[in-house]
Image (spheres, helix red, strand yellow):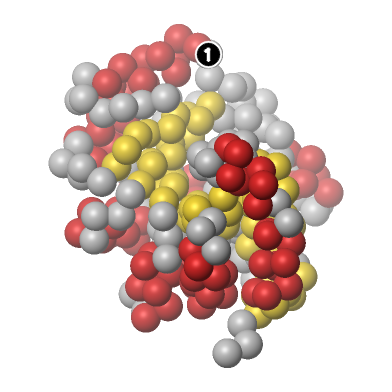
Amino acid sequence: MSVHGRIHSVESFGTVDGPGIRFVVFMQGCLMRCQYCHNRDTWDLHAGTEIHVDELMEQIESYRPFFDASHGGVTVSGGEAILQAPFVAALFEKCQAKGIHTCLDTNGFVRHYTPAIHQLLAHTDLVMLDIKHMFDDKHIELTQVSNQHTLEFAQYLHQIQQKTWIRYVIVEGFSYDPIAAKALADFIAPMDYIEKVELLPYHPLGKYKWSAMGQAYQLDGVSAPSQAVMAQIKAVFTQQGIHAV
C-alpha cells in the first residue's frame, strides 16, 4: 500500500525527544492552539511537504550507526502525529522491522480509536504524552480545547500497558500551581506503565514564528520558571513516589 504523509521538517540529531540520538520527524497539522507553541507553523493541516514513507525511511536508515551507538531511534512529533496515524503506523512498522526504536510524541488528542490508532501503538516502543493541565478550564484557556481526550488517552495507555513518559510544561499563570501538579500526580500515580515525568520549563523560543506569521505572541513578557519553582513542582511528584526529572 502506498502511504504518504505531510511533514513540516526533520531533525537528524535530536537529543531531547526520547532516549539516545533521535531522528525526529515533525508532522504537519495540530488541533490544539497552545499559547506557548514553539511550532506555530505546524498548525495548518494542509501545509508542509508530502512524502512517501519509503522515502523517509531512506533518510532514517542513513543514521542507523548513531542510533546503535546511543540506543536512540526515531521520534515522530509535530504538530500532532496522531492526526496522520496511518502514515506514522506504517513508518513505525518499518522502523521496528529494522530494529529501530520508535517513539511517539503526542498531545493525546484522540477523538476516535480507529484501527490506525491501534496499529500505530502496536508499533510504538515509547509514548511521550504531553499533558498540558489537569484542570479543564485552564486547559481550555491554554489550548482552546478540553483535556478530556488527552486524559482518556492516558487511561487507554494504562489499559494496554504502553511504556510512557509524561511531559509537563511549567508556565507562569498555568502550571506553576502546585495544586494542579498534585492533581496530575494523583491522576498518574496508579499508572505503572509511566516511567517518569519530564518537567519542562517554559521558554519563548518559538515567539519569532508567531511574529513571522503576523500574530501576537500571547505569552509575551512571561519569564521562564526559576529553579526554585521547578524544584517545588518536582517535589510534588517525588512525594507521590513518581520519578520526575
Q: In the image, is residue 50 above or below residue 178?
A: below
Name the one closer to the observer, 83 or 148.
83
| Quadrant in the picture for residue 138 | top left
Point 73% across, 56% down: residue = 62
Q: Could you tell me if residue 37 is visible in this image?
A: no
| Horizontal side, residue 211 vs residue 183: left or right | right
Quadrant (top left/top right/bottom left/bottom right) for the N terminus: bottom right
Asked if residue 192 is positioned above or below residue 113 in the image, the reply reads above
Image coordinates of residue 14 in percent, x first then y, are 65, 41
Residue 158 placement, left or right of 34? left
- Whether residue 19 is situated above or below residue 81 in the rendered picture: above
Residue found farthest to the top: 228
Q: Which residue lies furthest to the bottom in this view?
A: 1
Q: Residue at x 50, y 30 (%)?
A: 200
Q: Position of residue 216 (x, y in %)?
A: 73, 44
Q: How many labels does the image show?
A: 1
Quarter that holds the C terminus: top left
Q: Position of residue 187 (x, y in %)?
A: 22, 41
Q: Residues within 10 Å of mark 1 (few under 14, many from 20)?
A: few
Point 38% across, 41% down: residue? 166
The amino acid marked with disc number 1 is Ser
User: Which residue sits at x=59%, y=22%?
Assistant: 224
Q: Mark 1 points at which residue?
A: 226
Is residue 227 visible in the rendered image? The answer is yes
Query: Along the line of sight, which residue is nearer the eye, 207 or 78?
Result: 78
Q: In this view, does 130 lie to the left or right of 70?
A: left
